Each structure stands twice: as C-alpha cells, then as structure tokens.
Image: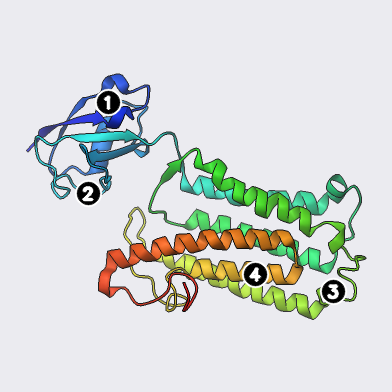
Amino acid sequence: MAFSITISAASNKAPSFARKAFPLTIEASPDDTVEDIKKKIQAKIPKFYTSRQRLTFKSEKKPLANEAKLQDAGFAPGLELEVKDLGPQIGWKTVFVIEYAGPLLIHPLFYYLPRLFYGADVAHSELQRMAFAMVEAHFAKRILETLVHRFSHGTMPLSNIFKNSGHYHILSGFSLAYDLYRPVFSTSSPYIQGTIRNNPQFLWVCAGLWAFFELSNLSTHLHLRSLRPAGTRKRAIPTGYGFGLVSCPNYLFETLAWLVVCAMTGSWASYLFTIVGTIQMILWALKKHTAYKKEFGKAYPKRKAMIPFII
C-alpha cells in the first residue's frame, strides 16, 4: 500500500541548491528501506546524493539506519521525516589510501635526497636501511588492507581528509623521515658506532619482532574482513588469534610493532608518533568494545578493549 511522505529540511540544514525543494513529498511503501527513501530524494534533487543525507523522524536526533524498512523503523502514514545535509562526502577507502600514501612517498625523498634536506650526503647505516624498509613495508601493508577491507560506512565528510592526513603526513611522514635519515643515525655517527644499534644481531632481532607483530596485525584485519559479507554492514563476534584477550588486537599489534621501531632507533619522532597513535587507538578500541557489548550483550566474551588485563 503506497502512501505519501513529507520530508522537511532539519533546521534549514539542506544544501543551498536544494532549499527551495523542501518540504518535499514522495511516494513510498512500508517495504521501502531508508536507503530507498534517500534514493527517491536524490531522484528529485540529483545533486543531493544519498551519502550526504541523514534521515530522522521529525524532531528526533537518532538517524535511521539505511537498511531499516519503514515499517520496522516505526514509520506510519502521517509521520514526517527530516533530512540533514552531511556536506560533501568522500569514500573511506580513498581517505585511508591518501593517509597512508603520504609517508610511503615522503620517506623516499628524505632517504634518497639527503642533500636537499640536510645539506650533505648521508652514508646510511644498517639501522637506517632497515628502518626505511620497515616503514615502507608498514604503509604498503596498510594500503593493501584498506583496499580489501569492508567498511561499515561508505563515506565521511570531505573536510576530515585534511585532519586525518595531517597525523600521518606530518608525524609519521615529515617528522619521522627527517629524524630517521639525518646524519646522526649514519654509519660514521658516534650515536651508531660502538653501540647496540650497530649490532647486526640486535637489528635482526628487532626486525623479526616487528615482522611478527605486523603479520599478526594483518591476520586480525583479514579475520575481521571475513566476518562481514560483501555489501552488508553485518557484524559478528570476532574470535581466534588475538581476540581471546582483547576486542581490538589489530590496534595492540600495531602499537607493539611501532614500539619495536622506537626501541631499535631511539628516534624521538618515532616515540611521538607511537604515543599519539596509541592514545587514538585506545579511544577507538574503547568505543568499539562498548559497541560490541551493546550489540551482543551476554553473548560477548569477557575481554579488555585493547591492552590485555589493563584497558
């Protein structure tokens, strides 16, 4: 049974090109999903694409899930919907690729063109060669994981790309690259000569530990991907390697990998990036941990969010 739905712009939050179109009336049925309604809005206002829209019941704040059918969401003829413009959007995959591509491209500039940044050539030590390979491999892996990941949300506000990229391009890009490949870490530097950082066994132990944590991180990412069928937002309880102790072992393993880089190099920039990144990952882990417990209730195993037995 078809019926009409009145849609208004929430607090004049419609884009400038669409303000005259509201209030808007469209035809719908109880079996239509929220995503269907968004598509019908876009059909009337082509520039107002679905990822820019957030639909709620009039005077309510909680957004309606895209996959929810109108009849299941509690909609009835006579009720009104509000739409809010989320602004220009960009795909999550695109954002993450841009974030990780920054360090991947910045580090070779400092490594191969030292005269440009330090005013002199640098005879790279084994420490610098290994650190360079580890950083490049890490961010290449992050791009690979992004390309195969199944995101629960398709887009984010375009403005976020500048904030998100700043963390990686500045802290793990320019700052880390400038510090790691400067002359103080070179072959002839007293900081290297006669110290453990000039010991091949120490360097290879660090590289082995780093590789173990990176592969463990990759394993958890692939497991999380396997839990979400393509084209859905379905989520299941993650189990297996790493998940027995914490909800987000991917963050734990990434932190441990960067701690190895810190211990191996002693670089102040590596410590800064690791500290800032770990704090952010703890916040993300706590949020995901809370969401898991809310969604699965008593079925969710007792475990910490990110750091075993602590957080």
Three-letter amino acid code at disc 1?
Answer: Lys
Q: Residues within 10 Å of mark 4 (few under 14, many from 20)?
A: some
For mark 1, does the 10 Å Cα neighbourhood hold few (<14), some (14 to 19), or many (20 or more) residues? some
Tag 4 secondary structure: helix
Label for residue 259?
4
Q: Position of residue 32 (x, y in %)?
A: 18, 42
User: As shown in the figure, which amino acid type bears the numbered disc 4?
Assistant: Leu
Judged from the image, the secondary structure of the residue bearing numbered disc 3 is helix
- The answer for how far apart the CA atoms under marks 1 and 4 are is 53 Å
Image mark for residue 68: 2
Mark 1 vs mark 2, CA separation in Å: 22 Å
Q: Position of residue 264 (x, y in %)?
A: 74, 71
The residue beneath circle 3 is 198
- Return the residue found at the far top: 20
| Type of the residue with mark 2 | Ala
Snapshot quadrant of residue 56 = top left
Name the spot of residue 223 as percent of width and height, x first.
44, 68
Q: Amino acid at mark 3?
A: Asn
Nearer-N-terminus badge (3/2): 2
Nearer mark to the viewer, of 3 and 2: 3
Quadrant assignment, res 155: top left
Real-space Cα distance between discs 4 and 3? 19 Å
Query: Alpha-carbon distance for marks 3 and 2?
Result: 60 Å
The earlier-in-sequence mark between 1 and 3 is 1
Could you tell me which quadrant the N terminus lies in? Answer: top left
User: Residue 108: horizontal and vertical position, in percent?
Assistant: 75, 52
Q: Nearer the viewer, mark 1 or mark 3?
A: 3
| Residue on which disc 1 sits | 44
* Disc 4 + disc 3, Cβ < 8 Å: no
